[in-house]
Amino acid sequence: MAKFGFKIGSAIIVAALSACSAASDGGETAIESASDSKYLSQPLVREIYTADPSAHVWADGRIYVYPSHDIDAGVPEDDLGSHFAMRDYRVLSMDNIGGKVTVHDVALDIADVPWAGRQMWAPDAAYKDGTYYLYFPVKDKSDIFRMGVATSKSPTGPFKAQAEPMKGSYSIDPNVFKDDDGAHYMIFGGIWGGQLQKWVSGSYDPKGSNSDLGKPDEAALTPKIARLSDNMLEFAEPPRDVVILDETGAPLKAGDTARRFFEGAWVFKRNGTYYLTYSTGDTHFLVYATATTPYGPFTYKGKIMEPVEGWTTHHSIVPVGGKWYLFYHDTQLSGKTHLRNVKVTEMNFNPDGSIQTIQPLKK
Ligand code: FUB
């Protein structure tokens, strides 16, 4: 199957918000669809298409979601995800899970990022000392993904981009994790269209000739991690591999496509354990591994979510009011792989810290 091709078809036409879904007040025409009872949860907003939701609860207690803003740019679908040709970011916010969702004005436009070429992909955000930081992957004018940083005094922007990408940054899907000691780490990377396989030698190789892709018995490519500098604008250290081991202590292999890292890493800490969660991409699972430090090594533990409708999903996990929530996306509203909608559902842990697998489609 081609990357980002349809996995499960959907035909959705008319609609009504279910009790689970939140009304939104973005002031734009709602995208209508059937309120289909087959879905575990309903889209958070219907005015715009959104994906890759990075959720945070800042000091004001409100929930802020930093998603990709999907558009139909008319770019033909290909294996590198060229049809994901997003041009700006919009922030969503809500007082509580299930509450009214606000779609905020444009937080950052590609036209205001001097070095950007195309494709604003999955962002994340952080807060430190009165400033909000938006981290975003976008291709530079040479068509190489880099990480940008933009700042604002407001959690919803507008954000002002730095004049250059972060030094030494590459690939996609930044997740900024704040540890209990106040240190911030960026975990990032994604294979295939995310270009991680092109950086195996330490510099950009357009052919990705040293990568594990097509070598199923070799150790799989891993996400990367680097602590951020005190000013939050750069890496404080060279990015390192985040190794993911199997139950025997061996690194997951490239051919182990149901468990190996593909994209969309998100790290959180619960009861002293670090959880690395990620998408397996072409096998469509959200999975997790655990460790005793943010650098790992992590040990694979299991599935968080079975496949959604759409090629893949991308998520974040946050505690809100004593419960844990999984933000994710599917293609319920459009049935199209590049026009996605974000959702949220509660997740549950077993007494031993393992995660109960979520089924996003009702049987
Ligand atoms: O939204 C564009 C890309 O699709 C993201 O960066 C990936 O995680 C996948 O969701």
Image: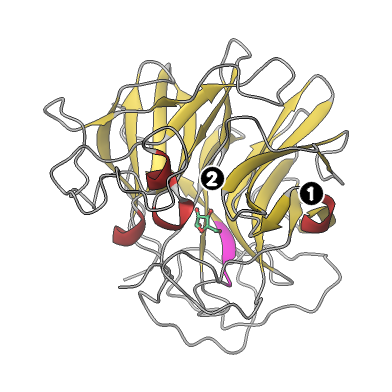
Q: Residue drawn 15% across and 28% down?
A: 250
For the rendered model, the colour scheme is secondary structure
> Can the viewer see residue 103?
no
Q: Please indicate whether residue 255 sits to the left or right of residue 165 in the image.
A: left
Q: Residue drawn 35% across and 62% down?
A: 307
Which residues are drawn in magenta? 339-343
Question: Considering depth in this image, is 292 or 175 the residue closer to the camera?
Answer: 175
Secondary structure under the numbered disc 1 in the rendered image: loop
Whether 341 is among the magenta residues is yes
On residue 173, which mark appears?
A: 2
Amino acid at the residue labelled 2: Asp
Q: Residue drawn 75% across and 34% down?
A: 133
Residue 122 x %, y %? 59, 51
Residue 18 x %, y %? 60, 71
Question: Considering depth in this image, is 67 or 224 the residue closer to the camera?
Answer: 224
Ligand 1 lies under 8 Å from the Cβ of mark 2: yes
Quarter that holds the C terminus:
bottom left
Q: Please indicate whether residue 87 sits to the left or right of residue 42 in the image.
A: right
Whether 64 is among the magenta residues is no
On residue 113, which mark appears?
A: 1
Q: How many marks?
A: 2
Residue 114 x %, y %? 80, 48
Q: Residue drawn 69% across and 40% down?
A: 148
